[in-house]
Image (tube, rainbow, N blue to C red):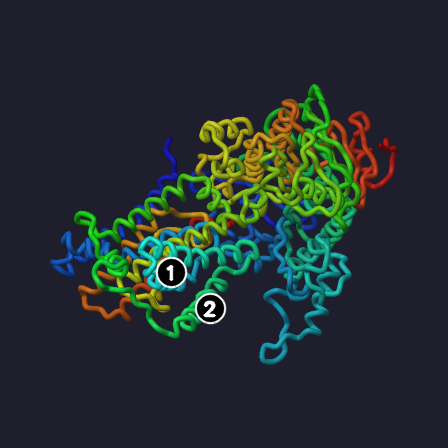
Amino acid sequence: MTNPARITSALETAGIYIVAAVLILLGTLVSSEFLTVANLLSVLEAVAILGMVAPGMAFVTYSGSLADLSAPATMAFSGIIAVAALPFGLPLALGAGIVAGLGIGALNGLVVGRLRANPILWTLAVAFFMEGFMRFTWSNNQVYPDTEAGTSGAAFIAMFRVFVGPIPLIVMVMAAMFLSAHVVMAHTRFGKESQLVGSSRAAALASGIRVERLVFLNFLAAAFAASVAGIFLASLNKLGVFYLGQGYDFKAVTAVVIGGVMLSGGRGHIPGVFGGVLVIGLLTNIMQFMGLTSFRQNIVIGAVFITVVGLQQLRLRLRGRDYA
Amino acid sequence: MNAEALLLRGISKRFPGTLAVDGVDLEVRVGEVHALMGENGAGKSTLMKTLTGCFDDYEGAIEVGGKKVSIHSPREAKAQGIGMVYQELSLARPISIAENVLAGRLPSVRWGTVDWRAALIETRRCLGLVGLDVDPRKTVEEISQHEAQLVEIAKVLGNQPCILILDEPTSALSREEVQRLFAIVKNLKRRGLAIIYISHHLPEVFEVADRVTVMRDGRKVGTHDVGEVTPEALVQMMVGRKAGEFYTERKRAIGKPFMCVEHLTRLGFFHDVSFALRRGEILGIVGLSGAGRSELARSTCGLDPVDYGRVTLDGETVDPENYPRAVSQGLVYLSEDRKEEGLFLRLSVKANLLAARISRRGNEMSLVQRFIEELDIVASSTDVDAGTLSGGNQQKVLLGKWLATDPEVLILDEPSRGVDVNAKRRIHRAVMALADRGKAVLLISSDLPELVGLSDRAIVLRNGHLIGEMRAEELSEESVLLAANGHGALSHD
């Protein structure tokens, strides 16, 4: 049986990979060093942190809560807590960092899920509050790990730099997060119910779905992803500080949206989001080869976001899908 | 014979994969009410959308008042004097009636400030056309559904159309309100408007229309003077085959009480309501709109709160305000609001059918296939968005969603509102089959033949109080109407 809906959906996923392929082609033209294993691996390395945040963010968007703009604050907070807890040993420090991030996610999930706060404004407010809170608590200072060899601090710093065989650990972690996110979103009850909530909250409630709990869990998923990313970001910078994570809110939303997850919720999938992360990585890499400053890179990424959101809406119009 | 106000010749509109309207001719005269009938999916809505400028790629010719016109945008339709009142109201609820009625043409004085005096006078004039006497400064939220509908008509009339299209204007109205609406329609007709009246209700068509055109599968079947056709003939034209007996007699094997509602009260909605629902029984709730039928149903299953009283299912108490739990216990509610609460319009037919039973195991694809066949759901594939189906098929998907959970008690709230004859029959058959399998059904319906035909017994609700009970042999359309109005002999418990 031919299946038009499935074919279009496959094409939609393919779309972002076609863009990636075009970018690779473009990169080859820009520099002869572009298409080398080392460079492509460095692209993956460069997007690893973003690639840890984005799958979590995707759950929030997918389940109809638009975006978690407290992701940067969550990243910074879990990073600081992890670094601060290093004297108690690495495993405990990592656990503390994750728990700290999950706390923010739980708060978001509770307020957006139960009290139905606007997710954008609420998470923005949480980000603002957390920045103030971190600056106040640590008196605007950076928190440093112990760097002497053999300490948990040194191990912490090494996390970002360790290789598993030929592949960096961070790339492995990113891959693991994408893979598990994909399984959860596409194949579990939680994922299916999130889709229902994202498609229509009212209909989900009237179908006997525990909407509040699902919204809560989706924010928790986003916070978990941001915490992991935050810890690796602290490891990269060899310190924890309130501003680590800045910009990841918008970049993650961009990856999610250009990866085909609809801002209106209920549509999209994780492989697409990975494509979105890849495209951002390639784009940034090419711009670096071209010698563009980071400001100009921001202009390009912003323009890509604007174009993609515009195209998505246009496509919905053309398909007549604005009936809902 | 009156002059023709509108002439359509060979109108066709193609959507990807289907020819929704196929070479339709239609002639509507000045000062006539022209009913347009047909099952859901027959192409009525698409034809009307063509007329109101929703498409720019139709084929065929349109003449308005003898002049050939092309209508490719809602603006052009408006300019040609075509106005449509949609089934779903398009009013902005938090703003005033005046601003709604005069949307896009608020009179202004200098520097664009609104001339409120003129606005109120003009709004009153428009409201006068529909015989509505409310303060135009009130917001739409403050007026009743019926009044809002009249405001909507007044808004369209304000643009001085010569052709007025009414799409199922009575679906949300009570009987008295329908009568008032008909008086207005007849008055507009006398003023020389050409009115196209879309409806599923045969009695309405015979009461208000002069001629009737029936469509089926995108084509026109025929146009007749209302005086020359019988309801049976119209149904025949719509279904294209023998209508047959609607409600087949079923063996009523009614068992022990299964769901007991005891002294259930939600202050301001319904008070001290007690009744028992037995296995294998279809229990109707008789009542006028506003009697508290839906509210009672929603509180019973835990969607809405309860102040006093309790509900038990096979002796086990049902948690108040915990609908997810009720669903897992087999107590489910089919919402009257298909678009908002019923379906996930942007998700596939398959996802919708499985939406309420995600947690359960079983072969999903075979389950989906089973309901597609059992309910005769017409969709090009199980992966198309539910929102693309016709109303009748959407309603079948909604019923399928609940049947797929294998419910013990199914509460139906207007299970076939705005649905064509065939879909209705499928839905009824499925409901009766459920009861025959020993499950219990609670039925709320404003469709009297449906309520009378399906119910084994009925309870009567009036102003939030249970005022009596009717046995199967006491049920008739007349007795139910009388009972809902608080008259007639009722056997009290």
Residue located at (78% from left, 37% from top):
B274
- Number of other residues with Cα within 10 Å of mark 2, as a class: few under 14, some 14 to 19, many 20 or more: few
Name the side, left or right, on which B426 lies relative to B450: left
Q: Chain of mark 2?
A: A
- Residue A187 location (% of width, % of height): 40, 39
Foreground of the two, B118 or B261: B261
Foreground of the two, A106 or B382: A106
Q: Which residue is mark 2?
A: A129
Mark 2 in CB contact with mark 1 (< 8 angstroms): no
- Residue B374 location (% of width, % of height): 54, 26
Indicate the amino acid at tag 2: Phe
Foreground of the two, B320 or A100: A100
Q: Is residue A283 among the parts visible in the rendering?
A: no
Q: Which residue is mark 1?
A: A78
Q: Are marks 2 and 1 on the same chain?
A: yes
| Rendered position, B226 above or below B103 | above
Quote the CA–CA distance across marks 2 and 1: 15 Å
Toward the bottom, the furthest residue is B110
Residue located at (64% from left, 37% from top):
B415
Name the side, left or right, on which A298 lies relative to A309: left
Q: Is residue B316 among the parts visible in the rendering?
A: yes
- Residue B228 location (% of width, % of height): 71, 33
| Rendered position, B405 above or below B302 | above
Residue B169, numbered circle: none
- Residue A143 location (% of width, % of height): 33, 68
Secondary element under disc 2, as helix, strand or loop, is: helix
- Number of other residues with Cα within 10 Å of mark 1, as a class: few under 14, some 14 to 19, many 20 or more: many
**Disc on the earlier residue, 2 or 1:** 1
| Rendered position, A166 above or below B207 | below
Secondary element under disc 1, as helix, strand or loop, is: helix
Q: Quadrant of residue B160?
A: bottom right
| Rendered position, B89 above or below B323 | below
